Amino acid sequence: MTRIAKLYCPYCGKPLERREGDGRSRLYCGEERRFIYENPIPAATAIVTDESGKMLLILRSREPGRGRWALPGGFIEMGESPADAARRELEEECGVRASDPSLVDIIFQESAYYGASILIIGYSFAGYEGRPRPGDDAADLAFFDPSLLPDMAFEAHGRMIKRYLERREELRRLWTEEF
Ligand SMILES: [Zn+2]
């Protein structure tokens, strides 16, 4: 991963350098003589379907992926569970409250935009309340037949949807067993 911007130590504020550690190039704080470890950034996405099995997608109003479609979702806040993050993003972007999350999969993606590896944790929800309306990062929203998806903003979301379709029956069984 190439980084152009100069990076500073999050602990002491001094400029960081690159140094070899455990066989890879790592960030190093010369002031404190320690490596600063970089880790993937976790994000959460939500899959919600209507009665006919169509999937709720948002038209992104911001970069990355502006003007293209995506699953509702975003980065997980400190102290927030991945499922709660998916539910919060769904509420912020689509105005609906979802219940009964099931983990679909965890998808890995290298993001050139963020200059980082992203772990996308996907949840499907058994149901939702409220009338969907676009908010926050969403310019518009619509329900799509999963076999006729529009131009997607993120390749990883396509993989998440594929995993959901493979596991759909199994996830439904999980929901019905809980009640
Ligand atoms: Zn430092």
Image: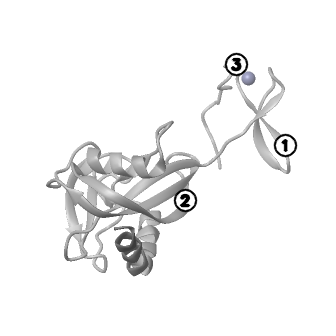
> Residue flagged by tag 1: what amino acid is it?
Glu
Q: Residue at horizontal 85%, vertical 48%?
A: 22
The verdict on label 1 being within 8 Å of ligand 1 is no
- What crowding class fits label 1: few (fewer than 14 Cα within 10 Å), some (14-19), or many (20 or more)? few
- Relative to 96, say whether 127 is above or below: below
Choose top left, top right, bottom left or bottom right for residue 39: top right
Which secondary structure lies at badge 2?
strand
Q: Residue at horizontal 52%, vertical 45%?
A: 114
Which secondary structure lies at badge 3?
loop
Q: Which residue is mark 3?
A: 12
Q: Which residue is mark 2?
A: 109
User: In the rendered structure, which disc, 1 or 3, sits on the residue that comes first in sequence?
Assistant: 3
- The Cα atoms of the two marked residues, 2 and 1, are separated by 24 Å
- What crowding class fits label 2: few (fewer than 14 Cα within 10 Å), some (14-19), or many (20 or more)? some
Choose top left, top right, bottom left or bottom right for residue 37: top right
> Residue flagged by tag 2: what amino acid is it?
Gln
Q: Residue 133 appears at what percent x and percent y?
A: 16, 51
Q: Residue at horizontal 39%, vertical 77%?
A: 173
- Relative to 165, say whether 103 is above or below: above
Q: Is residue 53 left or right of residue 46?
A: left
Choose top left, top right, bottom left or bottom right for residue 135: top left
Q: Which residue is mark 1?
A: 20
